[in-house]
Image: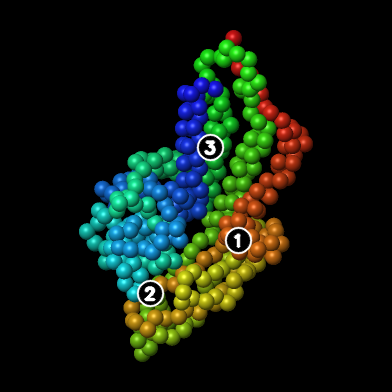
Amino acid sequence: MGVSSTVQRAITVVLVGIAAVMVIGELLGQPFLLGYIATGSMEPTLGVGDGFVAMPPLLAGEIDSGDVVTFEAQSIDGGGPTTHRVIDQTAQGYITQGDANSFTDQDAGEPPVTDAQIYAVVLQVDGEVVALPSIGHAALFVQSGFGSVIGLLGLDSGARVGAATTGFGVVLITVTLLYGFVTDDAKRPTSRSTRRDGVISGRLVVIGLVVMLSLPVLTGMVLPSGMTTTNLLSADPSVADGQGRVPAGETEELSVSVENEGVVPKVVIVEPVGDGIDIDTQQLTLETGERASVTMRVDVPVETGPFARSYTEHHYFHVLPLPVIGLLAAIHPYLPMITIAVLSTTPVVAVYAVVVGIRPITMRSTQR
């Protein structure tokens, strides 16, 4: 293999890896190692389509003023992941602002951002954000393209995300499997080689099949999962009315609803995030269309004013025993999802192995 061919292959592996990481981030609804900017609120630091390195808060350490963070917004653009700079910190949380904005997010109605809402901290070197120019344009293009196509079919938003991630996964797998035929050396080697060009490993085909079939199943569990933040107002007991205003310095009980809107029975694990919240029921088994109520106890700050409490829901198809799901979830919340998604491909892969066999596939050239 020549030097140029090796460089080409290395570049392609890197590009496919970046695309795969960004797809995972889209699937999980938060940046995973890499993120990108979809609006102009962080210009000129980060422009539309620019990427950034997303560090988990645990690795980034204590968050200070000047840090750029990605957090789950409650009101900005209707809520969702937002990447803005921390400019101050209060007892209720962080004050954030886009570099291109003349006002803080809190002036616009966003509650102070808590640690529980922060997904990632943007990598900075010597106080400067490490920007990856334009790598987000590809993700935006794919997201827009698949969204338009699925929209024409009249499917809902969940189906759009599932189709987009699955479709993008198919593209990535296809590129990976056919790469060798696109970048073959122009010249044949003058010496005999034991390497066979134009051959796809049978194991690679099986891996690609597993990944492609797992994505829709994984999407069905990831989409309804995530963190929910409840915004409340600590008020004087004489004016607390239970409609978002709760007595300062007391413990308030709130009820939240958890529902299985799918067609497969689910196990839902509900857990508190951060301090000041405790949840009674943490593991629920829900049949199709079933709904359950979960009671959470919230410690209300003594200081009056807005505050937030957060909890997470993780949804798992009930195809594994409950103790197994609980054990895997204790290691990492997404581990049961990955395990269930991979196991769901077993029947198809078994049929493929019996009918086709796990053997190399040879692509024959028609050129003379």
In 3D space, how far apart are the residues under numbered discs 3 and 2 (Cα atoms)? 43 Å
Query: Which residue is located at x 30 percent, y 63 percent?
Result: 65
Does 321 sit above or below residue 307?
above
Give whichever of discs 3 and 2 has the lower sequence position.
3
Q: Amino acid at mark 3?
A: Leu
Residue lying furthest left: 102
Q: Residues within 10 Å of mark 1 (few under 14, many from 20)?
A: few
Does 345 sit above or below residue 251?
above
Position in image of residue 136 (x %, y %): 39, 43
- For the residue labelled by badge 1, is the local secondary structure a helix, a strand or a loop? helix
Q: Amino acid at mark 1?
A: Ile
Position in image of residue 368 (x %, y %): 59, 9
Q: Quadrant of the N terminus?
A: top right
Frontmost residue, 188 versus 359 = 188
- For the residue labelled by badge 2, is the local secondary structure a helix, a strand or a loop? strand
Question: What residue sits right under mark 2 in the picture?
Answer: 307
Q: Place residue 209 in its image quadrant.
A: top right
Q: Amino acid at mark 2?
A: Phe
Give whichever of discs 1 and 2 has the lower sequence position.
2
Residue lying furthest top: 368
Question: What residue sits right under mark 3 in the picture?
Answer: 172
Frontmost residue, 300 versus 1 = 1
Question: What residue sits right under mark 1 in the picture?
Answer: 331
